[in-house]
Amino acid sequence: QSVLTQPPSVSAAPGQKVTISCAGSSSNIGKNYVSWYQQLPGTAPKLLIYENNKRPSGIPDRFTGSKSGTSATLGITGLQTGDEADYYCGTWDSSLSAELFGGGTKLTVL
Amino acid sequence: QLQLQESGPGLVKPSETLSLTCTISRGSINTSSYYWGWIRQPPGKGLEWIGGIYYSGSTYYNPSLQSRVTISVDTSKKQFFLNLNSLTAADTAVYYCARLSIVEMATHHDFWGQGILVTVSS
């Protein structure tokens, strides 16, 4: 069981918007920045969001990140079938001195 | 663009030690603010951070694996290594190497290898 809690699955129709939550605690999300990763089937994870809300070069602005207190949220607008993937949040835990990942959320675009 | 490539055995016996290598190309290993990390993913499950190393040799480890893990680096070869001992079937996973940016309170893995499947079985 992960220290960072994500919903196992979310779904929405093409063109719609979806949000994925990541709940942590004061020693991790409450104190440090959050990153988000997309893992398409059979591939390595890919960085989507870093430092809560920044996008690496090449990531479309349909993907947004936010943080409030000990929780973070990934938002995806204008859903496409190509967005079907597993999504993971990540952050540093200052008490453990270790990086943490959420359990992952499977996005289905219906 | 920075590239990372894992190499090592695909099959290891229980109780033995897993040794993996990550080779960096198209970039430097001696870069400030970047650690070099290992992450694994059991089949059908989520990501688990194993640990990371700075080019100077400073390390961080996942507390749940710390007693069995050693990560080392050879800057002359632009390689870093994972040793995981006392293997069981639960260590069967795809193992990824990645670059870990650590700047004050901000961490993220920005470049990943393709991963290598390691099966622990007799």
Image (cartoon, coloured by chain):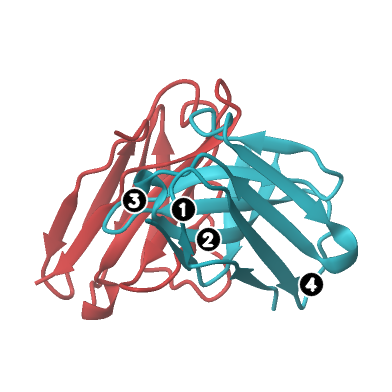
Chain colours: A red, B cyan
Residue ID at (38%, 56%): B122
For marks 2 and 4 on the same chain, the one whose residue lies earlier in the sequence: 4
Give the quarter of the figure containing the C terminus of chain A: bottom left
- Chain hosting mark 2: B
Q: Position of residue A50 (x, y in %)?
A: 54, 53
For the residues bearing labels 2 and 4, Cβ distance under 8 angstroms: no
Is residue B30 something that shows in the picture? no
Q: Could you tell me how far apart the alpha carbons at marks 2 and 4 are, in whole angstroms?
A: 18 Å
Q: Mark 4 Cα within 10 Å, few/some/many (few <14, many 20+)?
A: few
Q: Is residue B62 left or right of residue A2?
A: right
For the residues bearing labels 1 and 2, Cβ distance under 8 angstroms: yes
For disc 4, the marked residue is: B27
Identify the image quadrant of residue B51: top right
For marks 3 and 1 on the same chain, the one whose residue lies earlier in the sequence: 1
For disc 1, the marked residue is: B40
- Chain hosting mark 1: B
Can marks 2 and 4 be said to lie on one chain? yes
Q: Could you tell me how far apart the alpha carbons at marks 1 and 2 are, in whole angstroms?
A: 6 Å
For disc 3, the marked residue is: B46
The circle drawn on residue B96 is 2
Can marks 1 and 2 be said to lie on one chain? yes
Residue ID at (33%, 57%): A87
Instruction: Tell us which disc is closer to us: 4 or 1.
Output: 1
Nearest the camera: B30 or B84? Answer: B84
Q: Under tag 1, what secondary structure?
A: strand
Residue type at mark 3: give it.
Gly
- Chain hosting mark 4: B
Q: Mark 2 Cα within 10 Å, few/some/many (few <14, many 20+)?
A: many
